[in-house]
Image (cartoon, rainbow, N blue to C red):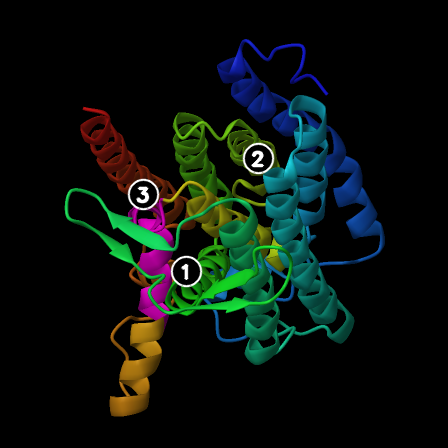
Amino acid sequence: MLSPLFSQYPTFLVFLAVFVAMILTLVFMPPFIRFLKAGQIGQQVRDDGPETHLVKQGTPTMGGVIMLIACAATVLIVGLPNAETFVLGLAILLSGALGLFDDMSKVVHERSLGLTPKAKLVGQTAIATVFVIVAVNFFGIEPTVDIPFIVTIDLGVLTTVLPIGENGLAIPWLYLIFADILLVGMCNAVNLTDGLDGLASGTVLIVMIVMAAIAYRTDLLEPAIVAASLAGVCIGFLWFNAYPADIFMGDTGSLALGMGLGCLAILTKSEFLVIIIGGLFVAEALSVMIQVAHFKRTRKRIFLMAPLHHHFEKKGWSETKVVIRFWIISGVFAAIGFSLYFADSMMGAM
C-alpha cells in the first residue's frame, strides 16, 4: 500500500493508479491470450451481425478477467481501501462475475447468446439495489439528484425505515428506483457499446478519467483511485483490443465497467451529469430501444442496424473510422459534463 507513503501527494496517487493498472494489464494479458487460444475459448459472433465481423469468430474473449484482476491489485497497491472502496469494488466484481458466467455460457454452448436478458437484469438490479441502500445508509449519500444550475430534486420524500440496527435502515423508494435504472442502464449501455474493436475500451477510458477527476475534486480519493485504475486497465487492454483485436473484454469487462461508472456517479453525486458524461453509451442504448419499439409497431427499421455503431458500418464507414469518431464524440460529451460539474461546483463555492 503506497497511499501512506504519498499521503501528501494525492494527485500523484491518482496518476500512479493509472500507470500501475496499465502496466499490470500489459504484463498479464499476453499469457492470458495464449491460455485462451490453447483452450480454444473464443468469441461467438452474431449470425445477423455485419458480414465483416465473421472473421472475428473464435477471437479470444473474457479479457475482462485480467482487467478486473489488474484493477483490484492496483487499488490494493496504490490506495488505502476503505468501506466505500470495498463496496464499490464488490459491485464491480460481482457484475464482472455475472458477465463471466454469461461469457462462459456462450463459449460452452457455442452461440452468441448467453444468459437470458431477464436473468441479467435480475442480477444487475440486485447488485445495484444493495449498493444504493448501503451508500445511502452507511456512506451518507443523500437521496437527491442535482441538475446543475437548475434544481436539486429530493427523491427521499417516500422513504421507509426498517427497524434494523441502531438507527434503522432507510429505503428511499423513489431514489432507489432512479438509481437502479441508472446503474442497470449504464451497465447494459456499456455492454451494447462493446461491439467494435477498441470502441468500449477507448470510450470507457475517456469517461473514467473524468470520473476520477470528479471524485478527486469531491475529496473522495479512494473512489478516484478506483476510477483511475479502471482507466488504466482500459489503456492496457486497448493495446490488445485495437483493430484487429487480439482479444475482447466480453461481458466480464463491459458489465463491470458499466456498473463501476454508475456506482461512481452515486458516490460523487453526479447522477444526472453521468448521463451527459457517458452520453455515447446513452445514445447506443437509445438506438436499440428506439429500433425495437419502432419495429414492433411498424415492422420497419429506423437504423440500418442497432446499436448505433453498426448503423454507420452498414452505411459504409470502416470499423476504425467508426471507432475513432465515436471516441471523439465520447470526449466531447465527457468534456461538456465535466465543464458543467466544474462550473456548478465553483458557483456553489462562491
Question: Which quadrant of the figure has residue 300?
Answer: bottom left
Of residue 129 and residue 191, the one placed in the foreground of this image is 129
Q: CA distance from mark 3 to mark 2?
A: 27 Å
Mark sitting earlier along the chain (1/3): 1
Mark sitting earlier along the chain (3/2): 2
Give the vertical position of 259 relative to 325 (above or below). below
Q: Amino acid at mark 1?
A: Leu
User: Which residue bears the numbered disc 3?
Assistant: 325
User: Which residue bears the numbered disc 2?
Assistant: 226
Quarter of the picture containing the C terminus is top left
Identify which residue is drawn at 52% across, 50% down. 135
Q: Secondary structure at mark 3?
A: helix
Give the vertical position of 225 relative to 312 (above or below). above
Q: Amino acid at mark 3?
A: Arg
Kindly give the residue lying farthest to the front in the view shown: 166
Mark sitting earlier along the chain (1/2): 1
User: Position of 137 compared to 279: left or right?
Assistant: right
User: Which residue bears the numbered disc 1?
Assistant: 182
Q: Secondary structure at mark 2?
A: helix
Q: Write the start and end of the magenta stretch as one range.
A: 270-288
